Image (cartoon, rainbow, N blue to C red):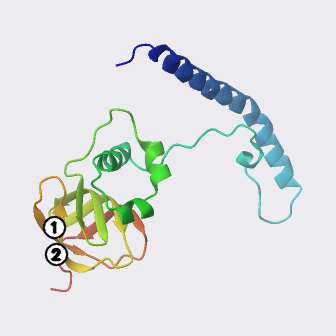
Amino acid sequence: MNFGLQPIWLVLNALSEGRRLEKERLHHQEMAVAQLTSIYFNSQKTKPPYTRASDFYCFPLEEQSSISPVICNTFLSLCRDESLPSWALRLAPVDELQKGASDGGSTSKPRLWMCRGIALICPVLEDEVLSVGLAIVDDDAPSGRVTVWDVDTGEAHVVWLPKVDDVFVLEGVWSWENPHS
């Protein structure tokens, strides 16, 4: 470890944190004016669309990710281990997943079940119900009775997947058995 660079990183982290705190302070100061401006602006209109206070912010706070930190951490650990195929990385909401990750946060076990065209991140199979934290689905993804493989253990699991039209599904829950049998 190079201890000569450590103070530089500490200074850069301190500057970044100071910038964030200053932006947060300015945001709190402008909130009342933005709310009053929005109320006045909307009172002068007779029909929608109406404005929100956030339309008048000069210093908006960065929004937190809507994706669970466990899912985000698991996704990033899969990226570090190079366990995700390139098509899954291309389709995944990477910016949102990076935003929601926490340093040293926990990951899910199993991390990933996958087959051609489907990546199931944070899968849980319980009482004939398959729950996934994030499902990434390619155009040529199979549906119906599908064999997926655990990338960490190599175990095969047979699951029933519906036809999914979305590129990714957040917190999907599907019946494990064929509903038509």
Q: Which residue is mark 1?
A: 128
Where's the C terminus, which quadrant? bottom left
Is 15 drawn above or below residue 181 in the view shown?
above
Q: CA distance from mark 2 to mark 1?
A: 6 Å
Judged left or right of residue 44, residue 69 is left
Judged left or right of residue 20, residue 33 is right
Residue 39 bears which disc, if any? none
Is 85 drawn above or below residue 54 in the view shown?
below
Judged left or right of residue 123, residue 12 is right
Q: Estimate the x, y position of residue 174 in percent, counting from the top left.
A: 27, 69
Tell whether label 1 touches label 2 (CB within 8 Å): yes
Is 49 drawn above or below residue 41 in the view shown?
below
Q: Tell me the quarter of the picture where residue 105 sits.
A: top left
Q: Estimate the x, y position of residue 168 in percent, counting from the top left.
A: 41, 65
- Of the residues under marks 2 and 1, which one precedes in the sequence? 1
* Residue 143 visible: yes
Q: Which residue is mark 2?
A: 177
Q: Residue, x 32% and y 61% (percent of image)?
A: 85
Inspect the image, locate mark 1, and give the three-letter code of the amino acid beneath it: Glu
Query: Foreground: 41 or 106?
Result: 106
Q: Residue, x 43% and y 49% (percent of image)?
A: 97
Q: Residue, x 53% and y 23% (percent of image)?
A: 13
Q: Estimate the x, y position of residue 16 in percent, counting from the top left.
A: 58, 26
Q: Tell me the quarter of the picture where residue 70 sits.
A: top left
Total numbered circles: 2
Task: Give the residue at the far bottom of this rendering.
Answer: 180
How busy is the neighbourhood of tag 1: few (under 14 within 10 Å), some, or many (20 plus)? few
* Residue 66 visible: no
Query: Foreground: 174 or 94?
Result: 94
